[in-house]
Amino acid sequence: MPAKRPAPRLSVLSEGQLTPAQRTLLAEMRSGPRGKGLTVRGPFAAWMHAPEFGLLAQALGAHCRYKTALAPRLSEFAILCTARLWRAQYEWFAHAVIAEKAGVKPKTIADLRAGREPKSAPKDERAIHAFVNELYKTRRVSDRTYKRVHTLLGDAAMVELTGLCGYYAMVAMTLNVFRMMPPEDAKLPFAEPA
């Protein structure tokens, strides 16, 4: 039985409805690494309703996604870990495909989606999985977990990994609060609460 799809709490604005501030936000998003073809969905659709916030959030997001010291595979893997913990439908929908293209194995993606530890994943992904889970669950990271990831990443990438987790948690909250879902023809990756 397909997962129940809740109605969005904010309207998805068409380009013809945008105020000057919203047009500025759209132009900023399209002028960056996301490109001119960016469709306003997911968190971007919510941020259109608060364009000043959206300008700052999308700029941080562009850095987190495209400019950190993390390899794209590890960045996308950390995003999927976050999406799974928050059960953020759109975040998972958008990034599962990107993660696979970046080199995350389909079995690893399936394990994450099911809430299983990705035991067959490479060592660096398993270390990041432990880091992300520990950070979100305990609000801290043990010395052992920190050292395990730091040995792989170094100082700058550790800072950026932590920031990426915070940014994508904010995205997940935005998606979940405003019920921004994948397109109607896409299956929801997680069951919605009754």
Image (cartoon, rainbow, N blue to C red):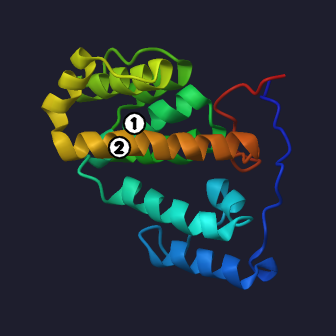
Left or right: where does residue 61 sit relative to residue 15? Answer: left
Q: Nearer the viewer, residue 30 or 25?
A: 25
Mark 1 falls on what kind of element?
helix
The quadrant of the picture occupied by the C terminus is top right
Identified by mark 1, the residue type is Ala
Q: Nearer the viewer, residue 16 or 189?
A: 16
Q: Label 2 neighbourhood size at 10 Å, few (<14), some (14-19), many (20+)?
A: many
Marks 1 and 2 sit apart, C-alpha to C-alpha, by 5 Å
The quadrant of the picture occupied by the N terminus is top right
Left or right: where does residue 184 sit relative to residue 98? Answer: right
Q: Which label was assigned to residue 75?
A: 2
Q: Residue 192: x percent and y percent?
A: 76, 27
Mark 2 falls on what kind of element?
helix
Residue at (31, 59) in percent of width and height: 67
Q: Can residue 36 be seen?
A: no
Q: Are marks 1 and 2 in contact (CB under 8 Å)?
A: yes
Residue 38 lies, with reference to residue 161, above or below; the image says below
Q: Nearer the viewer, residue 14 or 151?
A: 151
Residue at (81, 37) in percent of width and height: 5
Identified by mark 2, the residue type is Ser
- Residue 43: image quadrant is bottom right
Total marks drawn? 2
- Residue on which disc 1 sits: 78
Q: Residue 100: x percent and y percent?
A: 40, 41
Residue at (23, 18) in percent of width and height: 143
Q: Residue 112: x percent and y percent?
A: 47, 24
Residue 153 lies, with reference to residue 108, above or below; the image says below
